[in-house]
Image: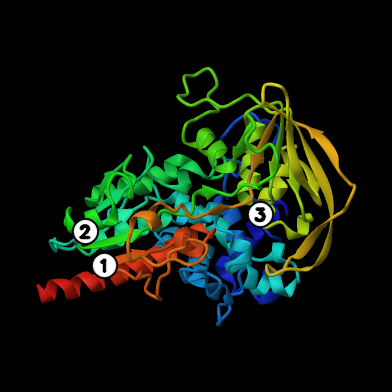
Amino acid sequence: MTDEERQELLKKQKTDKLTPADRYKIPPQDMPEQDPVKRRSNVNEVATGYTETHARLEAMRCLQCKKAPCIKGCPVQIKIQDFVAAICDGDFKKALAVIKENSLLPAVCGRVCPQEVQCQQTCTVGLKFKDPTKAVSIGRLERFVADLDQEEIIPTVAPETGMKVAVIGSGPGGIVTAADTRRAGHDVTIFEAFHKTGGVLVYGIPEFRLPKAIVQKEIDVLTEMGVKIVCNFVVGRTRTIEQLMKEDGFDAVYIGVGAGLPRFMGIEGESLVGVFSANEYLTRANLMKAYDFGKGADTPIVRSKKVAVIGGGNVAMDSARTAVRLGAEKVYLVYRRTEKEMPARIEEVHHAKQEGVEFHILQSPKRVIGDQNSRVTAIECLKYRLGEPDESGRRRPIPIEGSEFQIDVDTCIIAIGNIANPLIRQTTAGLEFNKWGNILVDENCKTSLDGVYAGGDIVLGAATVILAMGQGRIAAAAINDYLAKKKQKS
């Protein structure tokens, strides 16, 4: 679409009512982004964001469906058609206000939420063309208006209630819970195990996908509201939940510690030097700035030449693309199913390929091979074929006997998922868990203990930022109700 055509459509939108036929003719607006070659050597954000013209044209593609099926796909029920209509009209402040009625982190969610399997999956435009890539780019529009918001508007805090709330973990669920309970007038403290706040938003998601300054802005809003933050505080070690409540006087606790214990494959050679969990690799790179070689990074990382990343999810893509930026000459993505079955976002797969990551599909490591110094030299892989679907709905990978072969590598990153850290379970009597180690909660995110609530990955397993936020909001509402009743009784 030429600039002249774009301007003509914008003029028509002001003077005439666009018909569905007119809207269908508008092509999806591509997101401007860094050149693939240039971005291999920097950690700056890949996507540079819509211009105002891009955003308004993309918003004009929305049919303003009366039933708004997109809302049903949004975990926090943002009024999508309303904020998109406001963008179409050029009223960006109104658009952001609509989003913030339900979402506290639009700049974050606009970047990292898997909209293609949530709100955009049910978009009428995408369904009309039988092509999900033709759906209205709701996430990109959310990011656009969020990035225009330069003012830090501090939410109003109710009069002090005298009640204390402990929020364990400063990830997306913890941020939302802290904000909503503080707004109710409670004395709120966030306890964070790391030396920096933000949880997975900071240690798990690379700068090139989510700039740390965006997360810090949200943390700054919390501190301006009066939320206290204590870092280097491991609940279950520094203090237990019981101690926080019985000795330190907290009336309610929200557990949002995520599921940060990495899974390994249980194959020979996983203890060799040069084998990393994706958690460690990304934490070193993201939180400890391992990419600053020679600039005094406190926790540097090995300079790899040939890297194999095992897995097919977003974490695997983040690890592979990080390895590229850390200077690896070759980066292989090894996945035991086909690209169709990959749980990673289509956009992340596309970017990884653009940046030179080589995909080895229908393959999986059988063992990691090392030298006399116990350093990784290669991985031995087995080839697979796909069988019938398993419980996940994806076709089951079946090994092909005698198909072993080797790939020369000096680094192997295991990115096959996480499980819940058992620390809370081991130190909290009476708290109920399922067989996978996730905390059991009711519809209000209440646990088996009075005054204790939980949400996010520690409840759901590996989930998304927006789902964690949704649970944080539910839990905060339940905590506020619980504390109001508790105060009445006292």
Three-letter amino acid code of the residue under disc 1? Gly
**Image check: 218 left or right of 183?**
right
Read off the residue under disc 3: 344
Q: CA distance from mark 1 to mark 3?
A: 36 Å
Q: For the residue labelled by badge 2, is the local secondary structure a helix, a strand or a loop?
A: helix
Precedes in sequence: disc 2 or disc 3: 2
Image height check: is 213 above or below 295?
below
Q: For the residue labelled by badge 1, is the local secondary structure a helix, a strand or a loop?
A: loop
Read off the residue under disc 2: 245
Q: CA distance from mark 2 to mark 3?
A: 40 Å
Which coloring applies here? rainbow
Quarter of the view holding residue 256:
bottom left
Q: Which mark is residue 393?
A: none
**Residue count near mark 2 (Cα–Cα under 10 Å), binned few <14, some 14–19, many ≥20:** some
Q: Nearer the viewer, mark 1 or mark 3?
A: 1
Residue at x 56%, y 82% (from the top left corner): 67
Q: Tell me where residue 374 appears, x and y as whole percent.
A: 67, 26
Along the line of sight, which residue is nearer the eye, 451 or 96?
A: 451
Q: Tell me where residue 151 appears, x and y as whole percent.
A: 34, 48
Along the line of sight, which residue is nearer the eye, 325 or 365?
A: 365
**Residue count near mark 1 (Cα–Cα under 10 Å), binned few <14, some 14–19, many ≥20:** some
**Residue count near mark 3 (Cα–Cα under 10 Å), binned few <14, some 14–19, many ≥20:** some
Quarter of the view holding residue 237:
top left
Read off the residue under disc 1: 451
Look at the numbered discs 1 and 2 and tell me whether their residues touch, using CB distance below 8 Å.
yes
